[in-house]
Image (tube, rainbow, N blue to C red):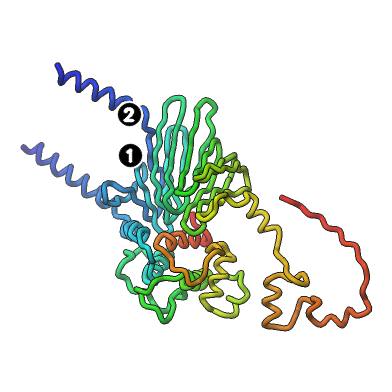
Amino acid sequence: MKLIKISIASILIMFFTATLHAEISVLKVEGSAAYKEGNKWIPLRTGQKLAEGVKISTGANSYADIKLNSQNHTIRIKPFTMIQVFSKETKTDTNTHIGLKRGGIMAKVPREGNVKTIFKVSSPIATSSVRGTEENISYGPDTGMIIEVVKGVVEGTNTLGRSNTLSARQKFIQMYSKAEALNILNDVKNASIIQIYGNGLTADEIVTMLYSDDQTGSPGGDISILDNQVQNADINLKIIWP
Amino acid sequence: MKKVQILYITIIAVLSLSGISFSQDITQVTFLSELDGKSTATYGDALIMFKLQSGSTVSAKGKKISAGESYTLEGYTENDPLSKGMASLMTARYLDLDGSFMYMIFDFERYAYKACAANGIFSSEGSENDKLTGSELIELFSKISDIKGGK
């Protein structure tokens, strides 16, 4: 009698566990990609089902596409990446958590109206939370964690709880040595503005001057041709801030 | 008895076929896992990584690197600790980087590091003399892969 009760309890536990864990499956593999079982790395195969908490690693010129649940939440694991995947789902919600140890992933998390979605990617220094979006996330010890939004809205939060909400063209860059992430428009700013030094010269122009004749027509060079030709001029500037 | 024998043969055949499908080069995943835990990467590690990045399908370990490759450096042995300057010079040669006028003139580690910083490969905080850890070397190759048009 006791044996029957234990058997029924085991079957019930197995049934409920099965409904909690989402099906993690391999959609495509290119190059060298493997998952860890015990202490061994085993090659990934297309169509393979993976267990909750699986660790996946990719090599050079390699990638793997992984489907995380029935809602078509997918990630592409880029070269030189190692991640650990946890994914649960019920009929009303999905809960995915990816630990990014190194490298980068591209996540696609399409929005389903009635399904509550939690999708988090964590590195040792920050976490990204997304809903209905596409994003590129990378992590490494030198440049820290970078979240780049492709579509939709993402929230980046560092380990001190300081967060930024990002949309397209914005980047969350959290470095190891900083208490706060860099300005989310830093990249746009860097692409739009150059630093100038004395006499309005850029760093490259100064370096050029050190090793060759001045070719910039700057006040430091030969500007005798301009003697007695000083005039005022109006300049119209149209600054387009993206 | 005959049915049991057929069953055994079938099982062995299935296992053998699955073994064939597992024949990916896992050596490099194992190598990366070991490199990740190293507190100081070596010049030899960097050579292996460049070889893998160049599309070598052979196992990463124990293969000779041709001295004619653009990324090889003179005056170092494979066990020498890898500095950011050394890795920068190898990277700048491999990617044919610009971004630093001085590097275009002088093929030195110092200016190669500046060229790498200008291209976002290394953060500008630090120096060319800093030693690279294994995980930093892997991060460098993630960026090289992106620049090369990784998938």
Q: Residue B7, percent across and down? A: 14, 39
Q: Quadrant of residue A162?
A: top right
Q: In this orientation, which residue lies closer to the viewer: A213 or B17?
A: A213
- Chain assignment, label 2: A
Instruction: Give amino acid for label 1.
Output: Ala
Q: CA distance from mark 2 to mark 1?
A: 12 Å
Residue at 92% x, 67% y is A232
Query: Residue at the location (79% across, 76% down)?
Result: A218
Residue B106 image offset from top left, x and y in percent: 57, 80
Q: Residue furthest top?
A: A1
User: Disc 1 designates what residue?
Assistant: A51
Question: Nearest the camera: A159 or A148?
Answer: A159
- Of labels 2 and 1, earlier in sequence is 2
Q: Is residue B81 above or below residue A14?
A: below
Q: Position of residue B51 (x, y in %)?
A: 40, 68
- Using the image, determine if residue A34 lies above or below residue B31: above
Can the viewer see residue B25?
no
Question: Is the same chain shared between marks 2 and 1?
Answer: yes
Q: Position of residue B2 (x, y in %)?
A: 7, 38
For the point 36% across and 27% down, which residue is it?
A19
**Residue type marked 2:** Thr
Q: Residue at x 87, y 61 (%)?
A: A235
> Which quadrant of the view contains residue A220?
bottom right
**Is B142 rendered above or below residue A91?**
below
For disc 2, the neighbor class at 10 Å (few under 14, some 14 to 19, many from 20) is few
Chain to which the residue tagged by mark 1 belongs: A
Q: Secondary structure at mark 1?
A: loop
Furthest residue toward left: B1
Question: Is residue A121 in view?
Answer: yes
Answer with left or right where residue B18 lies relative to residue A176: left
Residue tagged by mark 2? A17
